[in-house]
Amino acid sequence: MARMKQILLMLIAVVMVGCGKKDESAPQVEQKLPQSGVIKEQEVDPKAPSPTTSTKPEPQAKPKESTEEEIPLSEAAKQKIARAESGDADAQYGLAVDYREGIGLAKDAGKSAKWFRKAAEQGHADAQCNLAVIYKNGEGVEKDLKEAVKWYRKAAEQGDAMAQFGLGSRYENGEGVEKDLKEAVKWYRKAADQGFAFAQDSLRFMYTFGEGVLEDRVTAYAWCSIAAANGNALSKKYKGSIAKELTSAQIAQAEALVKEMIRKNPKLLKKKE
């Protein structure tokens, strides 16, 4: 079943380090350096409340308003600019975050995109993921879904969970790439295996409706349980509804499956802070 996707923005203090942290479900932004939280992608609760509706949100970045206001440069900002101009990828990434969020500098989407690209071209996964979101939303650059897919893929292949989720979403929706539900499931699974709750909820949906996989409500309930345990709002919302469609024996089977999945891969559950 086809699903409408919504696009929003969310702050995550985890990984601008992992575009690890958003697209039409809900991503977020994270960063390695100043952990101020740039926006990558995030998931949004759909308006249609039915647990069997084919509408699943996906993470994403929300454009920020830029300002022409001049901000005196601090010594720290001057040093970061100098490091970035000398080719330091982490400094370039940090500078991109600062321009995007207006941290010690006037907000400037164009300069933010410029420095994300410089860091991304050096293989900086967080910058690659954020650059993907920038191209997806057209922030400081002309919107280009194919270019977005290119950078999502580069970051995803480095193991960035948010980028894997974002790439899966592109395949699910056919945005910038030919629609391929099996490929979507593949990338959702990679992100889900790292404990990325949005991807886990996506698998809940895929197994519920048989998209890219055989319909399997027991496995759907298992992924729903894991995503809910990781705090995913949609899985928390739909867990009870899915349970009503299962027999007590099937629920017991799903609960046993959850235990076995976590035993094999403890990373499925995020550590509580």
Image: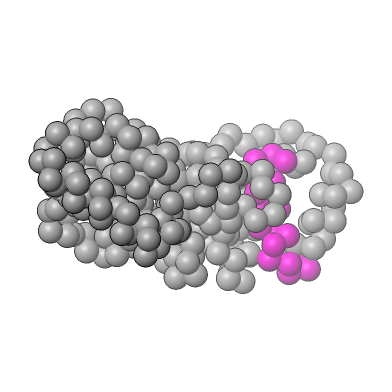
Magenta-span inclusion, residue 99: yes
Across and down, in percent, residue 263 comes to 37, 61
**Which of the 4 image quadrants contains residue 104?**
top right
Quick check: 2 left or right of 189? left
Of residues 210 and 47, which is closer to you in this image? 210
Q: Where is residue 255 in the image (x, y as percent from the top left)?
A: 25, 48
**Which scheme is used to colour this image of the protein?**
one colour
Number of labels in the image equals 0
Q: Where is residue 229 in the image (x, y as percent from the top left)?
A: 39, 42
Which of the image's four quarters has the C terminus? Answer: top right
The majority secondary structure of the magenta stretch comes to helix
Q: Give the farthest residue toward the right.
A: 75
Query: Does residue 16 sit above or below 91 in this rendering?
Result: above
Q: Where is residue 225 in the image (x, y as percent from the top left)?
A: 31, 44
Residue at image location 79% in from the left, 56% down from the top:
81
Asked whether residue 55 is drawn in magenta, I would say no
Q: In which quarter of the image is residue 64?
A: top right
Magenta segment range?
A: 85-103
Q: In this view, does 61 lie to the left or right of 48?
A: right
Is any part of residue 187 visible from this angle? yes
Question: Going 35% across and 47% down the picture, which residue do you hit?
Answer: 226
Q: Which residue is drawn at 32% across and 59% down?
A: 261
Would residue 24 be seen by someone viewing this image from the given angle? no
Left or right of 66, for residue 130: left
Q: In this view, does 148 lie above or below 252?
A: below
Q: Residue at the location (48% across, 39% down)?
A: 9
